Amino acid sequence: MEQSPEAPKQTPTAKEIAAQYRAKITGPNPEYKPGAQLPAARKLAKDLSVQLMTVQSAYSQLRDEGLILTQQGRGTFVRDPSVPLGTEPGSSPAYTALAAELSTIHDALRLLGERLDRLEQLVGDGTPPAP
């Protein structure tokens, strides 16, 4: 059933706003490329006739997905996918914590690899390992 032209326009939800901007960032012909600034949350809320919290929630969803960065006092920007997640200012706290944890895991694996190399050299030489 179609709505009449006089029917009030339905205001979008945070999920719908996030989906709209996700498509504008990741679509086949993205409107917003890495580094591009998204509209200010207050202006977008006014333009869409929604509460500021609705836009902030939409931007939060996109930030949690690693698509955008929010920098206090500067604005909201499309994240460059070539930069490791969690390393830029304005990254999602979850990605920042994940990046730190992955770095720790990477260091531990490197150390284990070095130990394994030493053990393989000892075994390969026929020299028994020291107790």
Image (cartoon, rainbow, N blue to C red):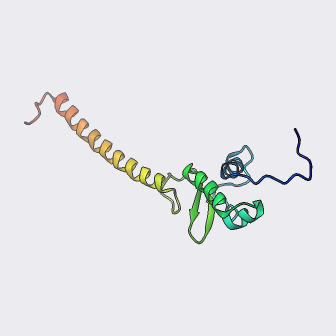
56, above or below 126, in the image: below
- Give the residue at x 73% y 43%: 28
Front-most of 101 and 58? 58
Residue furthest to the right in view is: 5
Residue 80: tell me if it is visible: no
Q: Quadrant of the C terminus?
A: top left
The residue lying at 22 percent from left, 32 percent from top is 120
Position of residue 107 measured from the top left corner of the image (x, y, whole percent): 32, 48
Quarter of the view holding residue 75:
bottom right
Residue sitting at the far left = 131
Residue occupying the point 61% across, 70% down = 74
Q: Quadrant of the N terminus?
A: top right
View extreme (bottom): residue: 73
Q: Nearer the viewer, residue 24 or 113?
A: 24
Q: Position of residue 64 (x, y in %)?
A: 55, 51
Q: Is residue 113 shown left or right of residue 78? A: left
Residue at 45% across / 55% down in the picture?
96
Residue 86 in view, yes or no = yes
Q: Is residue 11 left or right of residue 98?
A: right
Q: Quadrant of residue 42?
A: bottom right
Residue 50 horizontal/vertical position (percent): 72, 60
